[in-house]
Amino acid sequence: MQSLLDKIYKEVIPMLGRGKVADYIPALASVESQQFGIAICDNDGNISTVGDAHVPFSIQSISKVFNLVLAINHYGEDLWHRVSCEPSGLPFNSLVQLEYENGVPRNPFINAGALVISDMNQSRFASPHLAMRDFVRRLSENDEIIANRNVADSEFEYRARNAASAYLMKAFGNFENEVEEVLHSYFYNCALEMSCVDLAKAGSFLANRGYSKGAEEQILTPSQTSQVNALLATSGMYNEAGNFAFQVGLPGKSGVGGGIIAVVPGRFSICVFSPALNPMGNSLMGMAALTSLTKHINWSVY
Ligand code: DON
């Protein structure tokens, strides 16, 4: 694994400097763009790293995966009455489908879908953001994971679009709790800071039929794990999901903080971090590194 990571790093590093960091909130716009790290966690629990793999960064939309898993644990199949499992083919914060599809979001990874999932977790937990924080701490075996308050507050200040989609869903009867309360939980989850090592470990159950070696716990059943991986493959990269399937061919989830996690089922989970994004809002170096990965291992889920 180490020689594989070294090869990918060498191949991709000349691209460092391309792309643009997310700038919709000041707290993310000020992140140092010249960072690049990768971590792999194999199904025996071995970790391999290269570059800035231990640097915590804003996980942003990668949190949607763990938020979904918490909801599946409680609601099971009922969850799919409130959110569909179709790719949207649109940017993560688009509102256009929501109106003509009666307030039922296309999938749990676009913002509207993640907000419905957050609404479900709001109904279930006394303190949803602490449930989420404790969940990722357990999966990563790292009790120091915390959310960046500055990022969460800044997201809340610029909440208009997310608030609009939540209120639209409320108008359709697909939102139970106070919108502003759910937004606080959702933004807190997005503002969690984790490193590539933390995220590779946290996502490792997805490569291991639902079993987390770190937490020593069956997180999802094997068939639920296959379903989450299918959703990641079809919707994890928003309007770049097709290109990601074409170039990389793995289930994956990106965040505007510059992280991407991906899963090689039966073998390992991987997290790549580099804050500069491509025009679709996905890490430019992350896309390149994962493209290089599947070329070198000569394997994809397809
Ligand atoms: O809801 C938002 O706008 C952000 N907190 C999350 C955005 C994000 O990471 C989208 N994905 N790449």
Image (cartoon, grey):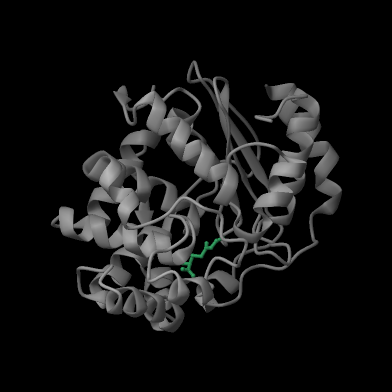
The percent coordinates of residue 72 (x first, y second) are: 30, 42
258 or 48, which is in the foreground?
Answer: 258
Asked which quadrant contains residue 75, the reply is top left
Left or right of residue 263, residue 121 in this image? left
Does residue 143 appear in this view?
A: no
Left or right of residue 288, residue 88 in this image? left
Does residue 112 appear in this view?
A: yes
**Residue found 54% across the figure and 20% down from its top:** 266
177 or 147, which is in the foreground?
Answer: 177
Above or below, 284 against 175 in this view is above
8 or 167, which is in the foreground?
Answer: 167
Quarter holding the C terminus is top right
Instruction: Count the labels in the image.
Output: 0
**Residue found 49% across the figure and 61% down from its top:** 110
**Residue found 74% across the figure and 32% down from its top:** 294
Quarter holding the N terminus is top right
**Residue found 70% across the figure and 47% down from its top:** 244
Above or below, 40 against 119 in this view is above
Left or right of residue 20, residue 202 in this image? left
The percent coordinates of residue 24 (x first, y second) are: 56, 77
Residue furthest toward the left?
A: 126
The percent coordinates of residue 109 (x first, y second) are: 47, 56
The percent coordinates of residue 201 (x first, y second) are: 46, 33
